[in-house]
Amino acid sequence: MSPSTTVPVLTIDGPSGSGKGTISRRVAETLGWRLLDSGALYRAVGYAAGAEGLDLSDVDAMTRCAQTTKIRFHAAADGSDTRVLVNGHDATDELRTETAGAAASAIASIPSVRQALVDMQLAFRKNPGLVADGRDMGTVIFPDAPFKVFLTASAAERAKRRYKQLKEKGLSVTLATLQREIEARDARDASRTVAPLKPAVDAVFIDTTGMGIEDVVAKVLAVVRP
Ligand code: DC
């Protein structure tokens, strides 16, 4: 057993818009643990590929891109959002767009791309603990994690939440388009042959439809501190 496996990990997996990002951040802050936003890694690779004008369906080019893209997370001193640097460029805002999400979902179905990002994810496992947010955290990356949660919500509710977030950021979207995109992304993430989106057998399943953030945070914290 490598020494890092003694570091506690809470995995939070689930589909897009299930509230994972917000909940993971809040739970990590409360526990004083580090946070891995694994979706940002896939988004960053997709973004880097786009910036270089590469074809997202070119497996060799995407694999090289995943192996060589330099991704750094910088926590802002004033407590505002962590910035994500992709090959030295602050791409935080670009990474949050639906285009970046769709590109991430497309390249995430390539096994060699996923493989290229494994070590980077494992390196986040440091004391006093890690909250790992993603799709395959409890099933593939940290299968030995002592705490696992799978968050979900109805597609309609997830579309509504995403709509509100994007509107607040001043981005122009329609609810119907968002719901269609979310369902298409869910279907692709759940049906890919490598690391599909599915709850770990030992995960606590929480349906957050109709629940407020505080209640979900409390439920997730109770998994770590019953
Ligand atoms: O969590 P997110 O929306 O930022 O993730 C963007 C895409 O990246 C998602 O559609 C699927 C992919 N992804 C993945 O395959 N595995 C992860 N652990 C995280 C994200």
Image (cartoon, helix red, strand yellow):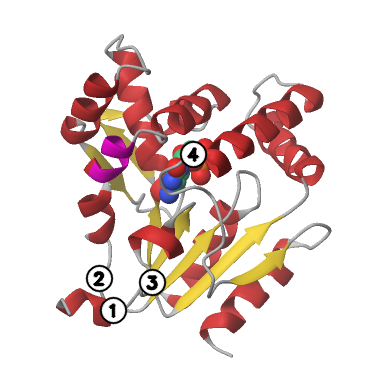
Q: Is mark 2 on a helix, strand or loop?
A: loop
Mark 1 touching mark 2, by CB under 8 A?
yes
Q: Position of residue 180 (x, y in %)?
A: 73, 27
- Residue extending farthest to the top is 53
* Residue wearing tag 1: 7
Instruction: Note whether ligand 1 is within 8 Å of mark 1.
Output: no
- Pick whichever of labels 3 and 4 is earlier in the sequence: 3
Q: Does the residue labelled 2 lie within 8 Å of ligand 1?
A: no
What residue lies at 51% left-to-right and 66% top-to-bottom?
200
Residue with the mark numbered 2:
126
Is ligand 1 within 8 Å of the beta carbon of the residue shown at mark 4? yes
Separation of marks 1 and 2 at Cα, in angstroms: 6 Å
Q: Mark 4 points at which residue?
A: 192
Residue 189 visible from this viewpoint? yes
Question: Which picture quadrant has residue 45?
Answer: top left
Q: Main secondary structure of the magenta part?
A: helix
Q: What residue type is labelled 1?
A: Val
Q: Which of marks 3 and 4 is in front?
A: 4
Range drawn in magenta: 111-115
Chain-order first, disc 1 or disc 3: 1
The residue where tag 3 is placed is 33
Q: Quadrant of residue 53?
A: top left
The amino acid type of the residue labelled 2 equals Lys
Q: In this view, does 195 lie above or below 110?
A: below
